[in-house]
Amino acid sequence: MARRIAIGPWLLALAGLAAAAWAQSVPSPSPAGERAAESRKFADPEAGFEIELLPGWRPESAIENDGRRALEIIYRDRSQALLKARREGIPADCDDDPPRCLADREAETSLQFRPDFQLKKRERFSTAIARGALLTFTFRRVGKPMTGRYYYLQTDDQTVWTLRFEGETRFHDTLRYQTDRLAYSFRPLP
């Protein structure tokens, strides 16, 4: 005859407490907690801005065709995401909504000539220091599907900063939270 062992309620409570203590000692896999802990401010006086870099993003200097230094901010690998920021003056014919005007102008004059260009979205938004417009589009580069996300930030009466994020669609489409966060942390230097 088999003998049964009765587990008392006190033993179950003890097991529950042990499991709870173990769970508190295991680090949280929350990427949001890690992002907040590991993000860091990056300022480049020559480029004229500062931005909060999230894990995986790093600044690199490149030399343009005309010999000027250009700052690029890369996510892991250039193919995944690449940010180039540029300061632009507001043209006289863009007085009523400069970010939207510059976004529309760029879509109609240069972006539309990229292979397989498709404009996906135009959005308006504002940050603590700027109001802006966002263009999201797809295109092809060397046969690969690419996504572009361009943020136009008006920081004063004469200036719009354009943050141009581009990368392979399979990577870049998963980074919307990060590109938004980088754009919202953008600050021009005095």
Image (cartoon, rainbow, N blue to C red):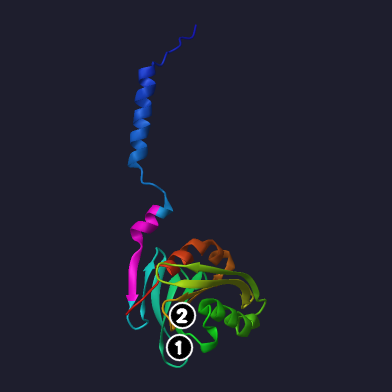
Q: Above or below — where is 16 with respect to 115?
A: above
| Start-end of magenta stretch | 33-43
Q: How many marks?
A: 2
Residue 114 part of the magenta segment: no
Quarter that holds the C terminus: bottom left
Considering every residue shown, the one lying at the far top of the view is 1
- Where does residue 35 sit, x and y in percent of width and height? 39, 58
Which is nearer the N-term, disc 2 or disc 1?
1
Q: Secondary structure at mark 2?
A: strand
Tell me which corner region of the image, top left, top right, bottom left or bottom right, holds residue 111: bottom right
Query: Label 2 vs label 1: CA separation?
Result: 21 Å
Amino acid carrying mark 2 in the image: Val
Q: Nearer the viewer, residue 16 or 36?
A: 36
Residue in the picture at 42% in, 54% down: 32
Q: Is residue 147 at all visible to an observer of this figure?
A: no
Q: Nearer the viewer, residue 88 or 50?
A: 88
Q: Is residue 132 at all visible to an observer of this figure?
A: yes
Mark 2 highlights which residue? 160
- Where does residue 6 sit, x and y in percent of width and height? 42, 13
Residue 30 appears left or right of 135: left
Q: Above or below — where is 15 with respect to 65?
A: above
Per the rendering, the mark at residue 64 is 1
- Where does residue 150 sit, x and y in percent of width and height? 53, 74
Q: Above or below — where is 145 with respect to 91?
A: above
Residue 112 appears left or right of 93: right
